[in-house]
């Protein structure tokens, strides 16, 4: 076979032009451990390795019937490695027990829009973007198998159907397993997927069934599947010390002394390359290498580094808070959005109320600390084993950072996407990957596994920005909300033109509800300087502003003497005000989930709860998902509090693709949101104060609530679940604390407010 | 550096290490047993949970010089015991995992719990599992899986 044919055959058939040739490619790839899909633990004899025939870049089938499906996106615990292959397998009509899943490398061949776009774990995009393309991939592959059977039997293609992994010709009572057809099928021209009919959802055998995560058996056996577990022949372990003040530079370091310590392989200064306006990328630091990681880390106690701490060395949270208070009193720097005349409406209101809400910076803290294994080879190529959410795309993707720092072209870089021990947005930034690559290069082109300490992970994060919201609301004489204003104070740094630009994820959406529902609104903004790196934390901006808006909405409901749930339905029913332009959220879908969560939680009976126990409600639309949640909270007289139960109702469309995983995402989002209510990151002397889980606590078993997770099925395309269930839980809980105690939580973490009662 | 002979998963292993080197890094970097995870380094998360003579131990703060003759059991071998296997199976039946990084430690802690308390209450589970953080928040399923492995009613009986 000519090379040219191989290239053609490997092309993804959805993209193949009409002139695209046949697809024969007989490889020798061995399917993985086929016991993994089955509910067994003991080591079972694996079936003999079989040659696998590639039908396209996603699906290969062996003659004995093993179906290898490539999972294209990074796995961070959101379940995508199982879910995307489920979509392919459904329309392929695969026998799921014969499927083995293989993680893709980072490769542009998987990233066409017709394949669902880029390889990224972010924005809860993967479900809506892949719902069509991955099913088409399966349907197209199935069609080729049917075509092969039709040709073999000399019957019209319309007479064929499939059962799991079998093509069936009922009239002749002939059943041909996929494995028997794959060599013939691979020679066929791929069909135009637009002509293929997708399954009727009632015929689904895989989609909608609870499927265990593919890697679960390996996880409970402790197999080496995470980034931190990577091993490369000849690799050394690296520790990397950076300036505690973000972006500080090394002036001097006692690298020779460190190098002389027992067990130390190397020690050297690494310099920042180019400008890094986000302060996320290759920053100055000192690398220490050893034959095990602890020895390298332990040697760091002897490091003596003089730092140039730079311009942000005097910044502190105390100063930020004072500046925010000062800015709140001054005229806003800019207007984000307005409808009507909020100032006039507030002046004319029968009743007005004000509320200032504050939330802190937060750290992502995935349990697997940042790490990466890299080999910058002597031949100029770079191989990287990266637990990453974003190998490509954007300035802080791994490819771009490594290209810029090491001065190599993209084609010289191979990135293996390794399962991440949590992401939450942290691994969208790939600073740890470029550090590993540069350390490998400077160490003399040896492979290196870089691991951060928890303290480094806590103190060098692209933080969720803190923020300050200063609300005013006006009610008319009938207690209708007629005006809402907000002066939002946030963080920025001068951009290329010198103007203060808001930091990453430090925005407050201009169209935040109830904008374009309330007749008059004005959302304004002021910016103060902040020297810290920031970035998206799971449900970015939403995880912060939802607490502020949905808590103040509760205040308004109480001021109006209205049931907070009924008040929300009332707002969602408001006509579009003159001059407003609604986009995004469909109020009817939201009203349904609010109503249903009220029913499921027994909201109407909440007044019978004893003092100290209360229920709160909130809703939020983000990442195309509609979520309403009710929290029931118990506050002890000594002020300690616990969320007893959360009821969650979500509308993410017509199909819950993998119910096992979908509910797990909701449950995790709820725990994550409550966890955030206990956390804060503060700064002093330009550096992070907190360092580990003793001062940056994670919620534990005893504080995790009972959860009732329900999906309201609607006739809309399915959307993602990595994020949208998180934002409403925070205000649902703070609103419940108010119901329990009469104390309004306007500042997070909750511990900032005294909750003792008698 | 000194030489230590330790019993890991029933095998006698001899390692050269600094006396202060934590067992975690001996397991991971010297013996290649990477199932035991590094999360915090200060016994604050439970990702590194192993058993020493059957007792829950945080390997990240246990110096290799302190192991002595105690039998070390890690996630790689916990499935060799009936209770460990029951816990692993329950973890799969409930599909506890999200990212999975803490789950080796969770399985080790849960197995130790069931070894001493075959039918734990919710309060027993809270107490035994308190030191094991799950950043993804799979606590509901961990609770359910422990009860599944114990063969008791899986309902959460705490106040709700």
Image (cartoon, rainbow, N blue to C red):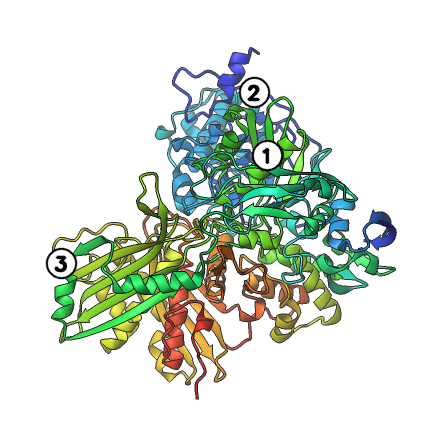
Find disc 2 in the rendering and name its residue: A25
Query: For the residue carrying disc 1, how many other residues have a C-alpha within 10 Å: few (<14), some (14-19), or many (20+)?
Result: many
Task: Pick whichever, B73 or A657, lies toward us.
Answer: B73
* Residue A387 can be seen, yes or no: no
Q: Distance between the residues labelled 3 and 1?
A: 55 Å
Say which of marks 2 and 1 sits in front: 1
In the image, A619: left or right of A44? Answer: left
> Which chain letter matches label 2?
A
Q: Do the residues labelled 3 and 1 touch (CB within 8 Å)?
A: no
Q: Residue furthest bottom?
A: A758
Find disc 3 in the rendering and name its residue: A340
**Same chain assignment for discs 2 and 1:** yes
The image position of residue A381, as x and y in percent, is 59, 25
> Which chain letter matches label 3?
A
Q: Secondary structure under badge 3?
A: loop
Relative to A655, does residue A166 appear above or below in the rendering? above
Q: Are marks 2 and 3 in contact (CB under 8 Å)?
A: no
Quadrant holding the N terminus of chain A = top right
Q: Secondary structure under badge 2?
A: loop
In the image, A388: left or right of A14? Answer: right
């Amino acid at each position: 076979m000519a090379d040219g044919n191989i290239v053609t055959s490997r092309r993804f058939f959805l993209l193949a032009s009409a002139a695209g040739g046949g697809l024969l490619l007989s490889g020798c790839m061995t399917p993985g451990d086929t016991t993994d899909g089955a509910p067994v633990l003991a080591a079972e004899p694996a079936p003999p390795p079989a040659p696998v025939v590639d039908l396209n870049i996603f699906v290969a089938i062996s003659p004995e019937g093993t179906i290898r499906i490539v999972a294209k996106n990074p796995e961070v615990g959101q379940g995508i490695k199982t879910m995307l292959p489920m979509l392919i397998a459904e329309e392929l009509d695969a026998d799921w027990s014969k499927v083995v899943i293989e993680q893709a490398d980072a490769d542009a061949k998987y990233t066409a829009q017709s394949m669902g776009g880029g390889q990224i774990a972010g924005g809860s995009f993967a479900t809506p973007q892949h719902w069509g393309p991955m099913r088409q991939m399966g349907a197209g592959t199935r069609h080729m198998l049917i075509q092969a059977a039709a040709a073999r039997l000399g019957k019209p293609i319309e007479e064929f159907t499939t059962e799991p992994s079998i093509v069936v010709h009922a009239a002749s009572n002939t059943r041909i397993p996929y494995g028997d057809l794959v060599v013939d099928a691979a020679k066929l021209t791929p069909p135009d997927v637009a002509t293929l009919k997708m399954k009727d959802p009632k015929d689904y055998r895989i989609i909608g069934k609870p499927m265990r995560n593919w890697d679960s058996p390996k996880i409970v056996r402790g197999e080496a599947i995470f980034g931190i577990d990577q091993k490369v022949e000849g690799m050394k372990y690296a520790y990397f010390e950076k300036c505690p003040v973000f972006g500080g530079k090394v002036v001097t370091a006692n690298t020779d002394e460190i190098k002389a310590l027992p067990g130390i392989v190397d020690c050297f200064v690494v310099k920042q390359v180019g400008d890094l306006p986000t302060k996320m990328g290759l920053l100055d630091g000192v690398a220490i290498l050893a034959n095990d990681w602890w020895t390298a880390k332990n040697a760091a106690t002897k490091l003596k580094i003089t730092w140039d701490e730079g311009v942000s060395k005097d910044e502190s949270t105390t100063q930020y808070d004072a500046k925010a208070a000062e800015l709140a009193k001054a005229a806003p720097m800019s207007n984000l959005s307005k409808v009507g005349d909020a100032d006039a409406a507030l002046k004319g209101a029968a009743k007005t109320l004000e509320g200032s809400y504050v939330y802190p910076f937060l750290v992502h803290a995935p349990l697997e600390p940042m790490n990466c294994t890299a080999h910058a080879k002597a031949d100029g190529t770079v191989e990287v084993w990266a637990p990453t959410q974003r190998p490509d795309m954007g300035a802080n993707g791994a490819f771009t950072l490594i290209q810029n720092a090491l001065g190599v072209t993209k084609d010289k870089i191979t990135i293996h996407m390794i399962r991440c021990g949590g992401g939450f947005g942290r691994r969208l930034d790939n600073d740890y990957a470029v550090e590993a690559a540069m350390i490998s290069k400077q160490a003399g082109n040896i492979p290196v596994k870089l691991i951060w300490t928890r303290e480094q992970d806590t103190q060098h994060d692209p933080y969720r920005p803190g923020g300050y919201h200063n609300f005013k609301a006006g009610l008319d004489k009938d207690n209708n909300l007629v005006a809402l204003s907000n002066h939002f104070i946030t963080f920025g740094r001068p951009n290329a033109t010198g103007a203060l630009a808001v930091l990453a994820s430090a925005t407050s959406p201009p169209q935040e509800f109830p904008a374009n529902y309330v007749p008059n609104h004005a959302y304004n903004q002021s910016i103060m300087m902040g020297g810290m790196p920031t970035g998206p934390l799971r449900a970015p901006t939403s995880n912060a502003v939802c607490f502020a808006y949905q808590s103040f909405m509760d205040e308004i409901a109480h001021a109006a003497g209205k049931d907070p749930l009924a008040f929300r339905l009332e707002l969602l029913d408001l006509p579009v005000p003159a001059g407003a332009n609604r986009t995004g959220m469909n109020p009817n879908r939201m009203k349904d989930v609010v109503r249903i969560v009220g029913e499921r939680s027994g909201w109407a009976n909440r007044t019978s709860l004893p003092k100290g126990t209360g229920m709160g409600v909130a809703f939020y639309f983000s990442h195309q998902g509609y979520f309403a949640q009710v929290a029931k909270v118990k506050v002890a007289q000594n002020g300690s509090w616990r969320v007893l139960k959360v009821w969650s109702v979500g509308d993410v469309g017509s199909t819950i693709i993998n119910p096992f995983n979908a509910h797990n995402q909701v449950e995790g989002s709820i725990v994550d949101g409550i966890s955030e209510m206990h956390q804060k990151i503060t700064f002093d002397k330009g550096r992070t104060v907190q360092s580990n889980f003793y001062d940056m606590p994670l919620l534990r078993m005893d504080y995790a609530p009972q959860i009732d997770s329900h999906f309201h099925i609607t006739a809309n395309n399915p959307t993602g679940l990595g994020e949208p269930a998180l934002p409403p839980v925070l205000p649902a809980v703070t609103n419940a604390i108010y119901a329990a105690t009469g104390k309004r939580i306007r500042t997070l973490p909750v511990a900032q407010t005294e909750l003792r009662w008698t | 550096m000194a030489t230590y002979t330790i019993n890991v998963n029933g095998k006698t292993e001899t390692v050269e290490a600094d006396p202060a080197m934590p067992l975690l890094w001996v397991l991971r970097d010297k013996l290649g047993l990477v199932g035991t995870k590094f999360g915090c380094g200060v016994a604050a998360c439970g990702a590194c949970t192993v058993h020493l003579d059957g007792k829950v131990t945080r390997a990240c703060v246990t110096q290799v010089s302190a192991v002595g003759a105690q039998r070390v059991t890690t996630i790689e071998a916990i499935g060799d015991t009936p209770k460990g296997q029951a816990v692993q199976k329950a973890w799969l039946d409930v599909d506890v995992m999200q990212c999975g990084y803490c789950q080796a430690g969770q399985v080790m802690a849960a197995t130790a719990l069931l070894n001493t308390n075959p039918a734990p209450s919710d309060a027993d589970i809270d107490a035994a599992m308190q030191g094991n953080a799950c950043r993804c928040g799979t606590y509901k399923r961990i609770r359910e899986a422990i009860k599944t492995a114990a063969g008791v009613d899986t309902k959460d009986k705490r106040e709700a």
